[in-house]
Amino acid sequence: MSLIRGTSKPDDGTPDATLVDRARRGDPDAFAALVRRHFKKAYTVALALLSNGMDAEDVCQDAFLKALERLDDCREPDKFASWLLQIVRNRAHNFRDYRRVRAAVSIELTGVAGPEDASDEAVQADLRTRLGRALGRLSDIQRQVVLLHDLEGLKHREIAERIEISEGMSRQHLFNARKTLREILGPTALKEHLHE
């Protein structure tokens, strides 16, 4: 059963602490409300760490299940979002480590690619691959900041609150991330990808 699919009910504004308390007492609708409210943040953090949408969704699903199992461990229910995002980060790091080990094992099974197609679609796919590799060269926090700012459209104040850094550090990480990405991709490719 997916915790993520089919969660389009509107948020009624019930505080997280109340929803956590209700979920602890067995109310499945309360936990579903927490999933709806915090999925986008969780997904953004996972995507920043993994650079792959499907992997990020899998990690979020896993993190929400882990949060449900460990709900009694959430000592400050009013800070549920921070607690959840730490679980997401941990699960994403574990997944990335697992993926790295799997890639090392199966690298010899990889076939040789055929002739490249010069169509626009192939060029875009190549750019996306290059962007993914370039994002992989950033630190975890730089990747989170650039994705939150340039893809999610968050302001530095919101980024600072979400990943628990100062606004000044958010600006610094964004500046350094963009500089690194420009060096790897060139300014045109970077602009096309982060705003497409």
Image (cartoon, rainbow, N blue to C red):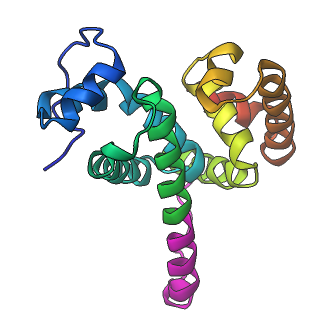
- In the picture, measured across the screen, residue 74 lies left or right of residue 130, that is left
Number of marks present in the image shown: 0
Q: Is residue 84 above or below residue 151?
A: below
Q: Position of residue 196 (x, y in %)?
A: 55, 26
Toward which corner of the image does residue 172 lie, by quadrant?
Answer: top right
Q: Position of residue 80 (x, y in %)?
A: 42, 31
Task: Name the outermost residue toward the top.
Answer: 13
Viewer can see residue 35: yes
- Judging depth in this view, the residue of 117 and 47 nearest the camera is 47
- In the picture, measured across the screen, residue 15 lies left or right of residue 43, that is left
Viewer can see residue 120: no
The kind of secondary structure the magenta stretch mainly shows is helix
Q: Is residue 175 above or below residue 135?
A: above
Per the image, is 116 magenta? yes
Per the image, is 107 magenta? yes
Toward which corner of the image does residue 17 lie, by quadrant?
Answer: top left
Q: Residue at (87%, 44%) from the top-left corner?
A: 183
- Judging depth in this view, the residue of 20 and 133 nearest the camera is 20
Q: Residue at (50%, 80%) from the top-left corner?
A: 102
Q: Position of residue 130 (x, y in %)?
A: 67, 52
- In the picture, measured across the screen, residue 168 lies left or right of residue 44, that is right
- In the picture, measured across the screen, residue 24 lies left or right of residue 116, that is left
State which region is magenta. Answer: 96-118
- Judging depth in this view, the residue of 179 and 2 nearest the camera is 2
Task: Name the outermost residue toward the bottom.
Answer: 108
Q: Position of residue 142 (x, y in %)?
A: 74, 40
Q: Residue at (29%, 30%) from the top-left corner?
A: 20
Q: Is residue 94 above or below residue 77?
A: below
